[in-house]
Image (cartoon, grey):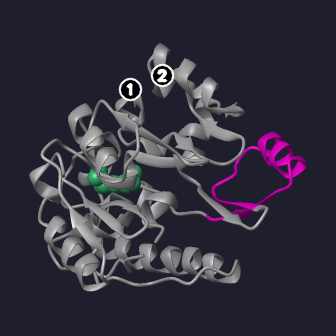
Amino acid sequence: MCRPDHYGIYYSINPWMKKILRNEGNQKIRREALGQWHNLKSVYEEEGFAVQPISQVSGCPDMVFVANAGLVCGNIFVSSNFRYAERQPEESHFRKCFQGQGFQVKTVEGKFEGHGDALFHKGTLVCMIGFRSSDRGVRQAAEHVGKTPVVLKLVDERFYHGDTCFCPLDPILFYPRAFDRPSRRKIERLGEAEALGEKDALAFVGNGTPLYRGTRQIYVGPMPSKNLRKKLENRGISIREVSLPAFKKSGGGARCLTLFL
Ligand code: ARG
């Protein structure tokens, strides 16, 4: 995780940021973000996960969204190749960090935004294209880790990264209208899946962090719908509700702030 010491909305590269740019101060956003980030970190630690920090570099406000650093699989780190110039300076900082930790660092030529667009579901690598990562990028990344990806196409720009609308719990939580029709069918073939309504999807329920601890499943994220809460609890999934509005302003949530090592 990356503490939001230099976080803010300094540019707009997704529809969530567009709304904010006009009317808010970054100092206030940063103050709120720090508190919310510490809450999220505490939840992970309470659930028994160790958090390894990476320092945020000034001038890289979106570096807090570490899920986008790259794809981690075993000892391999496939470094992201960001679509927008605004985020490209992050690449070398993340690469250096992973190199220093002894990972084998790989690169791709196509556009690729790490676990924002690449999620493991029971050993299958599910990749999303359409806004940030390209078909070429995700296939090159998958090849580096020896996987044949299931590639899904995103069609709603509010859900510009796959991890904003697809949470690989068991059952998968996903927002159907964020995907084209063939992709929805592919999701159904992946296993049991729970379709999110628009309200839950816009609250970024799809961006909750799925934690697996032995046979236990934990969902960490927003949970506005009592119905969905009941359904998941009946399936034995523990819910740790966290609210991350300061990060939502940038188009991110719990999963985006987290990279699994
Ligand atoms: N402002 C960031 C961007 O648009 C948010 C990234 C959210 N990260 C994620 N994994 N969905 O790139």
For residue 220: magenta? yes
Residue 153 marker: 1
Q: Is residue 203 visible?
A: no
* Percent of width and height locating residue 230: 86, 46
* Percent of width and height locating residue 50: 56, 84
* Percent of width and height locating residue 104: 27, 71
Is 173 in front, or is 252?
Answer: 173
Is 113 in front, or is 56?
Answer: 113
Q: Residue furthest front?
A: 146
Alpha carbons under labels 1 and 2: distance apart: 6 Å
Kind of residue indicated by mark 1: Lys
Q: Is residue 90 visible?
A: yes
Query: Residue visible at 44% across and 55% down?
Result: 248
Location of mark 2 (residue): 183
User: For mark 2, does the 10 Å Cα neighbourhood hold few (<14), some (14 to 19), or many (20 or more) residues?
Assistant: some
Query: Residue visible at 30% across and 76% down?
Result: 27
Residue 230 marker: none
Query: Residue visible at 44% across and 18% down?
Result: 180
Say whether residue 229 is left or right of residue 84: right
State yes or no: discs 1 and 2 in contact (Cβ < 8 Å): yes
Say whether residue 27 is left or right of residue 151: left
Numbered range of the magenta stretch: 217-242
Sequence-wise, the earlier of marks 1 and 2 is 1
- Above or below, 59 relative to 209: below
Kind of residue indicated by mark 2: Ser
User: For mark 1, does the 10 Å Cα neighbourhood hold few (<14), some (14 to 19), or many (20 or more) residues?
Assistant: many
- Above or below, 86 relative to 138: below
